[in-house]
Amino acid sequence: MLWILCPTCGERPVSEFRFGGEIPHVPDSITDPEARNLDWVWMQNNVDGVTTERWFHAAGCRRWLTLRRDTHTDRVVA
Amino acid sequence: MNEFVETLLDLTWHEPKKSYDVVIIGAGGHGLATAWNLATRHGITNVAVLEASYIGSGNTGRNTTIIRANYGIPESVRFYQRSLELYRSLEEETGASIVHSTKGLLWLAHTESGMRAERARSLMNQACGANTVMITPEEAQVLCPQLDLSGGGRYPVMGASYHPGGATARHDRVVWAYAQGAMRLGVHIIPHTPVVGLVRSGSRVTGVVTPTGPISAGVVLSAVGGRVTAVAAMADLRLPIRTHPLQALVTNAYAPDFGPIVASSELLCYVSQTGRGQMLMGAEFDSQPSYSQQSSYEFLQTVSTKMTHMLPFLRNLRILRQWAGICDISPDYSPIMGFTGVDGLLITTGWGTWGFKAIPAGGEAMAELIATGKVPALIAAFGLSRFASDHAMADQGSAGTR
């Protein structure tokens, strides 16, 4: 199971957290402002590998944290 | 598919040619159904279906095999109702057994707000051509005598919506029926051949690259499950898809007298009995995206807690197997089908936790799109462009979503 290190509460199981989505990254190749807005709102990098995302400690301190996680193995990376 | 099964089927694998009219990436249900429909309904047989592993190795072989049409928005209800009807006649059309069995589906409500949701679902379904009716707890008990109406004291059954058309079919056999039917008409199905790139000429996609060389194509359709973001990226196409694992489990065999499919939105789980008597159950997808197909102990805990409240007899069964598939979850829980904005590349994705039941209608619609170049009315609402035009098709009618 995935364990997440919360800065306030220490290492806690994933069931206490709510996934808040990856941090959006619009590729530089998209230049049109409308297209950049569309990409920011809807599109996902959805990488098979290390990604940076936001998590909410819903059943704990109720604060947000930023996490780097490898989606290939579903493990937190430093 | 194991070698024993392969000998029972009339599947002759082909070496890839240099060029096809249509190349479909992914020999799962949707890819194969599209190929079969192209061959049978449109006479297009110069088609190749490429598969990275064995046919049906992705989510088509990992789902809980439920077929139903009781969705939450008109466009979805009409689409899944078409699929439900096509499933009924699939054995006749393909001449292959898919072990299709109409069981009826009970969708339980445990709270007043759950009752409101099920009433809304029933009325929406009736208005759009699907048969769903509200029933009392006592009527539910008749349909499923094993049900504990007190829900273990915790999830009392206040009522249910009943969808008599709810059915199951053997998922591997659906794959084989379509594959065999398509191959007999000359479609090439090429397993163990991953697509590692797309051939592009200017902005147009003109073929695919495989480890054994490029294959040119008039049209490329991505019917990939799970790794669709990577395939789209080969054409610089961005998708609103997140890849989440979805888990399922089966127990050991129980006497074959569990009639209906039982689901609950509030408990987010669903159960049916397989032809072998095993109780097959699933729940919502994992909250965080992941490409790892690992299953978790937490899933077993959560599902068995909920399920044994509803169906106390399950306490005496043992869990036999659990597994996971990786699903493409779209932001509005509706599929994404049709043009991509990239010439020569079509897509059918976003099948999340609702892909198996959609195979016949999805294949029929995508084949019509390829053959005529026009988006069929049935899937017009599900184009990728809906996100740009602010017409997301939010549908919470899937058991795995909330």
Image: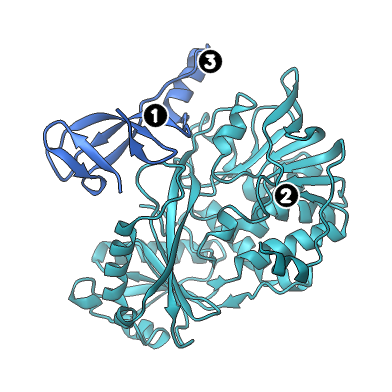
Alpha carbon separation for disc pair 1 and 3: 20 Å
Q: Are marks 2 and 3 in contact (CB under 8 Å)?
A: no
Q: Chain of mark 1?
A: A
Please give left or right for residue A16 compared with residue B119 in the image.
Answer: left
Question: Can you tell which chain is drawn cyan?
Answer: B
Amino acid, disc 3? Ile
Quick one: SS at disc 3? Answer: loop
Q: Nearer the viewer, mark 1 or mark 2?
A: 2
Q: In the depicted view, which residue is nearer to us: A75 or B254?
A: A75
Q: Chain of mark 3?
A: A
Q: Which residue is mark 3?
A: A30
- Residue B12: x percent and y percent? 83, 58
Q: Quadrant of residue A19?
A: top left
Q: Quadrant of residue B159?
A: bottom left
**Tags 1 and 3 both on a single chain:** yes
Against A44, is B277 above or below?
below
Q: Which numbered disc covers residue B191?
A: 2
Looking at the image, is mark 1 or mark 3 earlier in the sequence? Answer: 3
Question: Can you tell which chain is drawn blue?
Answer: A
Amino acid, disc 1? Thr
Quick one: SS at disc 2? Answer: loop
Q: Are marks 1 and 2 in contact (CB under 8 Å)?
A: no
- Check disc 3: other Cα within 10 Å, few if <14, some if 14-19, many if 20+: few
The answer to whether residue B111 is visible is: yes
Please give left or right for residue B183 compared with residue B107 in the image.
Answer: right
Against B235, is B326 above or below?
below
Quick one: SS at disc 1? Answer: strand
Task: Residue at 29%, 57% (x, y): give it.
Answer: B298
- Residue B310: x percent and y percent? 30, 75
Q: Which residue is mark 1?
A: A51
